[in-house]
Image: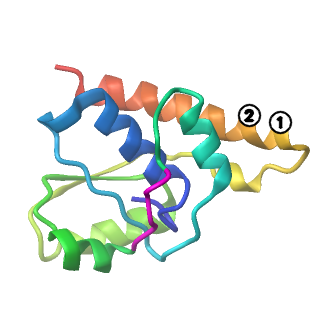
Amino acid sequence: MCGQNSVRSPMAAALARHLFGRSIYIGSAGVIKGEPDPFVTAAIEEIGLDISRHRPQTLEELEENEGLAFDLVITLSPDAHHRALELTRSNALDVEYWPTPDPTLVTGNREQCLDAYRTVRDELETRIRARFRP
């Protein structure tokens, strides 16, 4: 879960699905709904994954479409973390906060911006592998 479900959480979900297939159920949501980010698509395609069908959704939309039968919510931004902690009042789930930089804040040319997305992608992959490896 991240702020807008358009950058960090979709990357994390795509990576986790790729690494762990059907052995872990993965959902992805944001505090608010953002717009798809072409840099996310480019950074994920570089490693052979396709995220083109991802459509940002809010936590409320995720709950409506799939339910909130999760054991764990991993939050990647402060606002998502606060929102997830609110869920623990009425749902039995664990929340982990993985502070993750927002690559949309990086300025510069296309390559400099894409490098910021690559860095986030690679850091997320490392954390996901470490957290969920058997």
Which secondary structure lies at badge 1?
Answer: helix
The three-letter amino acid code for the residue at tag 1 is Glu
Number of residues whose C-alpha sits closer than 10 Å to that of mark 2, classed few (under 14), some (14–19) or many (20 or more): some
Residue at (60, 29) in percent of width and height: 46
Task: Give the prevailing secondary structure in the magenta stretch.
Answer: loop
Number of residues whose C-alpha sits closer than 10 Å to that of mark 1, classed few (under 14), some (14–19) or many (20 or more): few
Residue at (44, 53) in percent of width and height: 9
Residue lying farthest to the right in this orientation = 109
The one of 57 and 75 positioned closer to us in this rendering: 57
Q: Is residue 54 magenta?
A: yes
Q: Please give the residue where the numbered disc 1 appears in the rendered image.
A: 111
Picture coordinates of residue 116, whole percent (x, y): 71, 39
Q: Is residue 68 magenta?
A: no
Which secondary structure lies at badge 2?
Answer: helix
Whether 91 is drawn above or below 24: the answer is below
The three-letter amino acid code for the residue at tag 2 is Asp
Residue range (magenta): 52-57
Q: Please give the residue where the numbered disc 2 appears in the rendered image.
A: 115
Quarter of the image with the N terminus is bottom left
Residue at (43, 65) in percent of width and height: 80
The one of 113 and 47 positioned closer to us in this rendering: 47
Picture coordinates of residue 113, whole percent (x, y): 78, 43
Q: Quadrant of residue 85 in the image?
A: bottom left
| Circles 1 and 2: CB atoms closer than 8 Å | yes
Whether 41 is drawn above or below 63: the answer is above
